Image (spheres, coloured by chain):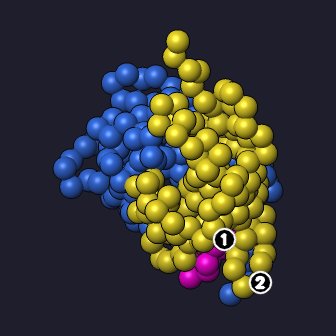
Chain colours: A yellow, B blue
């Protein structure tokens, strides 16, 4: 649970961890008026923030101590948005690591609305891992 | 153009329509320029914007890029058209090239590539002020929705 709080921005946005296991993470965000975009819907950025962190944290569960010396960083994020969320909705983002190798890692995340379970967005992320210093 | 009280506020003298969205106001970014086909936002990075590596969270950049491009498309379509049939992000592809740190001022520029009747495309770039190195680049696709009920 303490895992999420390690990203100050994630905590600032208000997300909480529901499950953190080997290569799998589920985060939740209860949205409010502060998360609104210009149309009054939940800002895509609130979703992508949580989705990016899902994979960042999931990679941490697999990489352990290596994260400190060679921190992984998002280099690509491709997201499709299927439906709006409305402030007040609770969002659930769950994702898993698809592959982790020496210098690169891939993950996939889905964001749904709690309650009706509607799929709101789906993202694929690529992370880079700095080479070990010799 | 820049004033100490300007954080989170819209472009001076252009009315509330050009103020940032609530989420972007919460992040603390401001709109520096807003004209047809071009919008520029800026944000001075703080600790609260970071990830565990101490650099900007990717979500900060995707938020500001989408905000800039949503505003760019509004600038081309006109606020009346946008209110009648809002546009919504359907695809977002962002490359992160460098990790800016607290104290860095990020500048995000958004440009419309094409604004059609039902689909619009835009491109955003994020740079560090002063250094002008590219830190992130995004391509976004928007769908112009039918009028909303109610």
Label 2 Cα neighbours within 10 Å, binned few <14 / some 14-19 / many ≥20? few
The residue drawn where x is 43% and y is 54% is A6
Q: Is residue B81 magenta?
A: no
Q: Which quarter shows the N terminus of chain B?
A: top left
- Disc 2: which chain? A
**Looking at the image, do the residues carrying marks 2 and 1 touch, with CB atoms under 8 Å apart?**
no
Residue under label 2, please give it: A116
Instruction: Give the main secondary structure, helix, strand or loop, of the magenta stretch.
Output: loop
Q: Earlier in the sequence, mark 2 or mark 1?
A: 1
Q: In the image, is residue B106 above or below residue A59?
A: above
Q: Which residue is mark 1?
A: A92
Q: Secondary structure at mark 2?
A: loop
Q: Is residue A127 left or right of residue B65?
A: right
Residue range corresponding to the magenta coloring: A83-92
Q: Residue furthest left?
A: B4
The picture quadrant where one finds residue B139 is top right
Residue in front for this viewpoint, A103 or A73: A103
């Amino acid at each position: 649970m303490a895992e999420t709080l390690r990203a100050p921005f994630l905590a600032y946005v208000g997300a909480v961890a529901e499950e953190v296991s080997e290569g799998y993470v589920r985060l939740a965000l209860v949205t409010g008026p502060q998360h609104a975009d210009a149309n009054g819907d939940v800002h895509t950025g609130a979703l992508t923030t949580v989705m990016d962190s899902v994979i960042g944290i999931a990679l941490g569960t697999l990489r352990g101590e290596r994260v400190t010396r060679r921190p992984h960083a998002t280099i690509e994020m491709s997201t499709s948005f299927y439906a709006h969320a409305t402030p007040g909705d609770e969002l659930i983002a769950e994702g898993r690591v698809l592959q982790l190798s020496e210098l690169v890692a891939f993950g996939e995340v889905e964001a749904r609305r709690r309650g009706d379970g509607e799929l709101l967005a789906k993202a694929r992320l690529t992370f880079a891992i700095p080479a070990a210093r010799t | 153009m820049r004033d100490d009280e300007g954080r989170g506020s819209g472009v001076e003298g252009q009315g509330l329509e050009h103020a940032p969205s609530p989420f972007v106001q919460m992040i603390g970014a401001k709109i520096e320029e807003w004209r047809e086909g071009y919008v520029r936002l800026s944000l001075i990075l703080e600790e609260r914007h970071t990830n565990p590596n101490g650099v900007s969270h990717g979500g900060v950049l995707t938020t500001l890029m989408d905000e800039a491009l949503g505003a760019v498309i509004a600038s081309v379509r006109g606020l009346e058209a946008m209110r009648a049939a809002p546009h919504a992000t359907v695809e977002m592809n962002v490359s992160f090239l460098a990790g800016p740190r607290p104290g860095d001022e990020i500048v995000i520029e958004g440009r419309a590539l094409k604004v059609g009747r039902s689909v619009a495309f835009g491109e955003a770039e994020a740079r560090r002020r002063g250094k002008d190195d590219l830190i992130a680049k995004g391509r976004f696709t928007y769908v112009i929705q039918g009028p909303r009920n109610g």
